[in-house]
Image: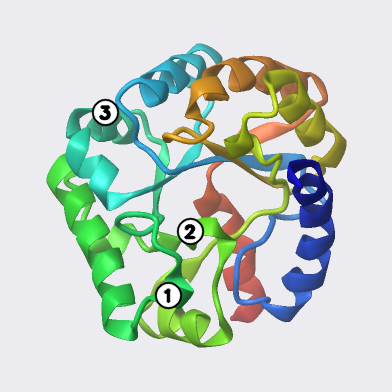
Amino acid sequence: MKMQLASVLPILYRILQPRFSNCLWSGDDNSRAIALTFDDGPHPRYTPELLAVLDRYQIRASFFWLGACVNRSPEIAKAICDRGHWIGLHGYDHQSFPLLSPIQLRDTLEKTQAAIYTACNLPPEQVRDVRPPNGLFTPKILKYLLQWNYRPVMWSVVPVDWTRPGVSTVTQRVSQQVKNGSIIVLHDGAYGGQDVAATSEILIPQLLQKGYRFVTIDTFWQPVKIKNS
């Protein structure tokens, strides 16, 4: 089942991406820029290990945080912000958005923004990129997010690292799928975070050697804005 999921997700991406074009699925396919993103943190142990790797290679990544985890580890959240990494929302406690009422959906996002403001002094209007937990949303949820001035962020490379298939398997999956403009999803939380530093330690130099450069998610929104204006 886990192997099936890893092989199905690239196909699912190709189906969903054109149907939900208001979501950010990837960057410019003419550019060697790619985005390394991390979900489910910050974690008190795994995130500092990851941060040390990012520091070593001077890579800026994008983190989609759970508000409950920010409240548990505010000092780690601040350390990430202070280094210039990009911050987005992943809900307060990883509840799938389709299970929430509109009021609950707005509440889980605003509570997470409040946690980030308390930890990092980032005002809510600067933290409006949202990645739905489990990648699940509906057209109605998307409509609400856009109406409330949030920006939905998805992915193009998902190596299913939360199932812990092993560092070599995760890096191989990324290497096989990555291309210009890829948004890569890894996890630094309770599921998958055990391996995230070791995975990043191998993956980053491999991708740099292939000529890719790492950017944060906000960079990928810029051509979208120009195109729609």
Q: Is residue 77 above or below residue 157?
A: above
State yes or no: discs 1 and 3 in contact (Cβ < 8 Å): no
Looking at the image, is mark 1 or mark 2 earlier in the sequence?
1
Name the quadrant of the C terminus: bottom right
Left or right: 118 in relation to 67 = left
Foreground: disc 1 or disc 2:
1
Q: Residue at x 42, y 43 (%)?
A: 40
Tag in front: 1 or 3: 1
Task: Judge by depth and name the residue closer to the eye, 25 or 195.
Answer: 195
Per the model, the C-alpha gap separating discs 1 and 3 is 30 Å
- What type is the residue that disc 3 sits on? Ile
Which residue matches tag 1? 99
Q: Secondary structure at mark 3?
A: helix
The residue where tag 2 is placed is: 133
Image spot of residue 8 (x, y percent): 82, 55
Amino acid identity at mark 1: Leu
Task: Let me know if residue 58 appears in the view.
Answer: no
User: Mark 3 = which residue?
Assistant: 76
Using the numbered discs, state the Cα–Cα distance from disc 1 to disc 2 in whole angstroms: 11 Å
Residue type beneath disc 2 = Pro
Residue under the point 24% across and 58% down:
113
